[in-house]
Amino acid sequence: MAQKPSVSASFNYETQEEVLDVKPQGTKLHIGIPKETAFQENRIALTPDAVGVLVMNGNQVSVEHKAGEGSHFSDADYAEAGATIIYDREEIFRCPILVKSAPPVVEDMPLIQMNQTIISPVHFSALQRELISHMMEKRVTALSFENFKDESGTYPIVRSMSEIAGSAVMLIAGQYLSSFNQGKGVLLGGISGIPPTKVVIIGAGIVGEFATRNALALGASVKVFDNNVYRLKQLQNNLGQRIWTSVLEPKILAKQLKTCEVAVGALSNEVGRAPVVVTEQMVAAMRSGSIIIDVAIDRGGCFETSELTSYEKPTLVKHGVIHYGVPNIPSGFARTASQAISNVLMPLILEISDEGGLEEMVWHKLNVREGLYLFKGALTDFYISELFDLKYTDLNLLIASRR
């Protein structure tokens, strides 16, 4: 007969100690802001007001001589905010953390230090393999503006720049419709007794939404195209009114382009090239003197006839239609754009300081991990690794292995 199990009176259970992840003490940061040398980049990533807040919280900020000139912030503004003005470019690159409003360029590579942290845009369309390889060799940790998310799951800097680009589009269109800019001599909007100007917007994202808002405010007749019906619904909800919308059906699009004064291309993919939805034949059928503004030109453009232009010569004419193809529209409104970037980065840098550094912060903040494309020299962005055939490392595994 099997013996019944028994528990000794001397035997007792004890709970095991719980191991907690102890948050490190805050650290004081040394931040460097170099002057941008990239083509037509006028923005600066931190304004004097933001620098003042960082310095008051015990951090050290160095700013290269004339770094804020493009945004109309003087060296005196930064000095009064508590920053140190540096006249030697090599010295500014010795700061452990670099904050830039443009991606690192080839000329910067010899100046980048080992184990440096760089917070900047990445501009996938202009990326070069040698840049990424060099930063990997220097064991750089890099956080990109484009992929960094806030706690609500949105991309705050991308959204701000898209709002500026969308708002600026109608100002640019109004300027080039003027007779003095070889336009049709049409007032963008409408006045009593005259039919309103027709505006076609391709893309119902943030750029499309703000372009629509401004066009409606001026009194224009707006028609919005997008293949994402949810986005079109969301656009109408955000505007709080019913507007003319359609999916991207070529015949309907061609018909509307034929009679419009302004066409805006604001369609882009998450990665890779923007889809071309307007053919040269459609452009040729448009009215002479009308204007195309291709906001997606930095990703190839939505119009087959679009070409990259610059602020020195912003437009070209094809088939009698004015084409505006300046890629970095927010840089033309540099002071506003700088303030928008600064509003996002200043609280982020304060948080990095409180958390004890970026490497510690990514352990606690999952949303910040989205923006890291290099971590201690390891490439953690799958798209870049596929693009250049470089070794990819999963960031989550990398962080876990360091604990």
Image (spheres, grey):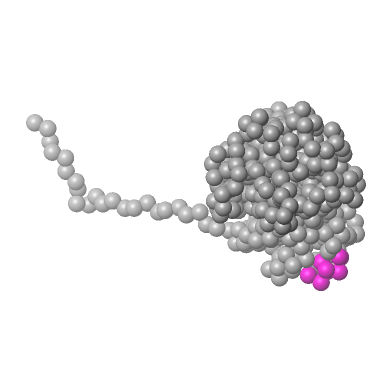
Which residue is drawn at the image coordinates 54% and 51% (left, top)? Answer: 237
Instruction: Give how far across and how far down residue 337 sits, in percent.
Output: 75, 56
Which residue is drawn at the image coordinates 70% and 68% (left, top)? Answer: 53
Determine whether, in the image, residue 375 is placed left or right of residue 310.
left
The answer to whether any part of residue 255 appears in the image is yes
**Front-most of 285 and 4?**
285
Instruction: Give how far across and how far down residue 34 sits, in percent.
Output: 83, 54
In the rendered image, residue 261 lying in the magenta stretch gets the answer: no
Q: Quadrant of the N terminus?
A: top left
The answer to whether 168 is drawn above or below residue 53 in the figure is: above
Range shown magenta:
74-81
Instruction: Give how far across and how far down residue 137 sits, in percent.
Output: 76, 38
Determine whether, in the image, residue 229 is placed left or right of residue 315.
left
**Front-most of 95 and 1?**
95
Instruction: Give how far across and how far down residue 185 sits, in percent.
Output: 84, 49
Which residue is drawn at the image coordinates 69% and 34% (left, top)? Answer: 255
The answer to whether any part of residue 362 appears in the image is no
Q: Residue furthest front?
A: 193
**Front-most of 65 and 23?**
65
Which residue is drawn at the image coordinates 64% and 42% (left, top)? Answer: 224
In the rendered image, residue 79 lying in the magenta stretch gets the answer: yes
Magenta residues: mostly which secondary structure? helix
How many marks can you see? 0
**Front-most of 331 and 395?**
331
